[in-house]
Amino acid sequence: MFWTMSDKQKITSGKTESENSMWGGRYAAGPSAIMMAINASISFDKKLALYDIEGSLAHAAMLGAKNIISADDVAKITAGLNTIREQIKAGDFAFTEALEDVHMNIEHHLTLAIGDAGRRLHTGRSRNDQVATDFKLWMRDAFDYLDAQLKALQAALISQAEQHTETVMPGLTHFQIAQPVSFAHHLMAYVEMLGRDRDRVLGARKRANECPLGAAALAGTPYPIDRAMTAKTLGFDRPTANSLDSVSDRDFVMDYASTASITMVHLSRLAEEIILWMNPQIGFVTLGDQLTTGSSIMPQKRNPDAAELVRGKTGRVFGVLMQMLTLLKALPLAYAKDLQEDKEQTFMVAETLDLALSAMTAMVLDIKVNKAAMQYAATLGFSTATDLADWLVRELKLPFRDAHHVTGKIVKLAEDKNVQLHEIPLQDMQSVEPRITANIFDVLSVEASMKSRTSFGGTAPVMVKAAISDAKKRFW
Ligand code: ARG
């Protein structure tokens, strides 16, 4: 809705809204249209509706068990909420802005349907603990969904890696050719990153899994409620320990946004690499028709739009992390309406992650590798110079610094002659270091270089195969 100045002037006097009697006896006049517009959250928090019902069912059952409301009331509330749940699932429930948020919408309709029993549901709770509970229930599912998607991407990377433990490519530092590595080794680096993401998800989920319900507005409640019971019914590990913290804590939202941001960093790095690899000048990989786009003017184009959009969407997720940090940083205890701003963009983050992870998994599975291009690139840039130096250390017992120096001279020779290291005649190498023998050529190929790196975590195929089977155990 676009508010103009005149619209605002029209409503500053306050129009009464008879349907909105939410604040009870004290409030004669309803809110002005501008008050409703700025205050209402139903347009986005209706996403919490099913969680709100779950929380209310648990709360009502507990109130009944503690004889705070009658068994008859519990039965009516339960039946009424079950009906509303079906209506919501079928899309037959009319949410209205006049009732502000998801909690009021559901309670109002419950009371319309079952009468006085509906008016007893809010005993011993407040919307402050209610919304924190709903959002944590939603967040738990969001964490589980995220974990499953991260795992699916790990599986896609591993299935590609399994086919490429012998596929040699240039490993880079400073985006300059450094040493040969296998494509599998490169992909497995991302499996590790995603493994840490999943660890963050797990940790955040665990921290979030305490139930705020029953903290009431901020101070607890005089009713003899059983918070452990509601916590258990809702699958929380325990009730939150401090009522003020219960209603004002949004660490789980910051945790989610920061976990999501770090995941987006990882996805964006991979997206960037796919984009580079697809550039015809590099030409390491191709993606099929289904995950690329053509150009409306240049018929030859195959553009990696999906990867570009994963990279491009990263900023909006970082933005939400900043938003949540800012939201909380100077907020006095306990609840303030600022906290209503925690949800809308968090939902957007979940949608973005879902899209980005789905697209990335599809792309990884779709990658076709151009082994010849990778192999050729790996031979450029004197990528086995370190192997040459290591040979001098091993065979001639040169100190590494001296070997480095000798190798530098040989690289200079190759550069002057415009050849690769393995193409330099033996006599030329011997003019730099007379004790060099023909055996040196054994270590100058990119394949030999890759195979020689057998230290734990190294790129030798035997090590990468072990890393793959280890990853399957660690991450499955
Ligand atoms: N819609 C509110 C929110 O999202 C629910 C809590 C309202 N509490 C209150 N004291 N007004 O935060």
Image: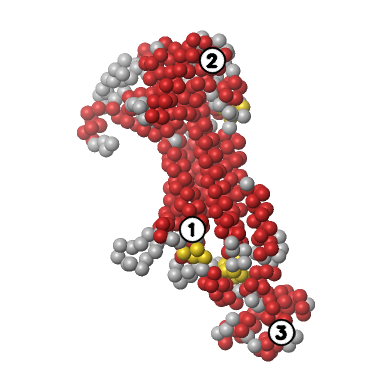
Q: Amino acid at mark 3?
A: Ala
N-terminal of the two: label 3 or label 1? 1
Instruction: Work out whether residue 317 can be spotted.
Output: no
Residue beneath the point at 68% across and 61% down: 463
Q: Which residue position is annotated with label 1?
A: 366
As measured in the structure, the alpha-carbon distance from the residue carrying label 3 to the one carrying label 1 is 43 Å
Q: Position of residue 250 (x, y in %)?
A: 52, 34
Q: Secondary structure at mark 2?
A: helix
> Which amino acid type is marked by label 2?
Leu
| Quadrant of the image occupied by residue 343 | top left
Residue 105: x and y in percent read 38, 23
Residue at left 40%, top 12%? 115
On residue 438, the disc is 3
Badge 1 amino acid: Asp
Picture layout, residue 202 above or below residue 391: above
Mark 2 sits on what residue?
63
Please state which of the two labelled residues, at mark 1 or mark 2, is closer to the viewer. 1
Quarter of the image where the N terminus is located: top left
CA–CA distance between discs 3 and 2?
A: 87 Å
From the viewer's perspective, tell me whether residue 298 is left or right of residue 85: left
Report whether 184 appears left or right of 42.
right
Q: x%, y% of residue 231?
A: 58, 25
Q: Nearer the viewer, residue 119 or 464?
A: 464
Crowd class of label 2 (few under 14; some 14 to 19; many from 20; radius 10 Å): many
Q: Residue furthest right?
A: 397
